[in-house]
Image (cartoon, rainbow, N blue to C red):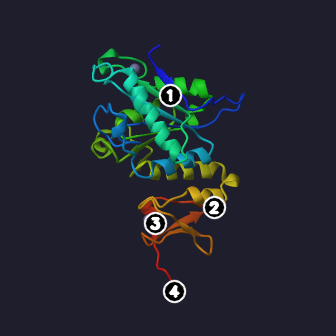
Amino acid sequence: MALRRHTAEDSTAQGLNRCRGVFLDRDGTIIEEKGYLNDPEAIELIPGVAQAIRLFNYLGLKVLVVSNQSGVARGYFTDATVEEVNGKLEALLAHEGARLDGIYYCPHHPADNCVCRKPEPGMLLQGADELNIDLPHSYLVGDKGADIGAAHRVGGKGILVLTGYGTEELGGCQGDPPDFVARDLLEAAYWVLIQEGAERRHEMAIKKELLEILACPKCKGDIILAKKGDGLICKTCKVIYPIKDDIPVMLIDEALPYKEKD
Ligand SMILES: [Mg+2]
Ligand SMILES: [Zn+2]
Ligand SMILES: [Zn+2]
């Protein structure tokens, strides 16, 4: 078996109740793209990723990392190195209260024609099988066209982030366009929140717990609920994000200017 797996804790599947999942690319999506990263100490979280993953956790979505690591096949580093980097990543996120349900990677070379290197969906299929995930109602967030391709092969939604290689890749995925283009993982998480909110409105009311997780998608700072309850305010950016049908719309392009009245 070529796929490697590492999971946080026992994520027992709950009977027939399939859960939705968010698959996350690693390099350029969760952590800064460094080109064949082989040093756990060099990991740099992209701003806002812990808040994004905490939101996925809050929404009850399983969070699985799916990463192409051809550096193993190329002889740049070993499986042990990948496991070490992944373990460190998991610890850094856990330190910020963000939980991963599984980490998968493909160690093969593109020329190996394996079933797991994205855009092939092998890692998604394995994760879905092991964690009882409903793939057509799941999401994949990544910075490459291959990420979007993998999402679409299993009938899920693909979100391209503009971190990592995202800006360069944007033009290249015209043939198979992403369902949404987000500036980064945090904004991607807010798009997921809107999709999930549309289907599960009754669960979405702005609760205190949700307010504590939400951060401004621009500056990643704290937001406060507007007195009328119709928006979320970032005082630093001087903007208000609307709340529509009880769903916070925390997208940068939807923000309205906010003037503080004194
Ligand atoms: Mg990437
Ligand atoms: Zn593979
Ligand atoms: Zn802000």
Neighbours of disc 1 within 10 Å: few (<14), some (14-19), many (20+): many
Q: Nearer the viewer, mark 4 or mark 1?
A: 4
Q: Which image quadrant shows ligand 1?
A: top left
Q: Amino acid at mark 4?
A: Asp
**Which residue carries the number 2 mark?**
246
Callout 1: CB less than 8 Å from ligand 2: no
Sort mark 4 into few (<14), some (14-19) or many (20+) by Cα contacts within 10 Å.
Answer: few
CA separation in Å, label 2 and label 1 = 32 Å
View extreme (top): residue: 1
Q: Which residue is mark 4?
A: 262
Q: Residue 131, position in %: x, y?
A: 60, 28
- The residue pinned by badge 3 equals 255
Amino acid type, residue under disc 1 in the picture: Leu
Secondary structure at badge 4 equals loop
The residue under the point 66% across, 28% down is 12
Element under label 1? Answer: helix
* Labelled disc at residue 39: none
Marks 2 and 3: CB-CB under 8 Å?
A: no
- Secondary element under disc 3, as helix, strand or loop, is loop
Q: What is the distance, in whole Å, between disc 1 and disc 3 at their CAs?
A: 34 Å
Percent of width and height locating residue 177: 38, 41
Look at the picture and state if 236 lies above or below 84. Answer: below
Disc 2/disc 3 C-alpha distance (Å) = 16 Å
Q: Which residue is mark 1?
A: 124
Q: Is residue 119 visible?
A: no
Relative side of 1 to 247, left or right: left
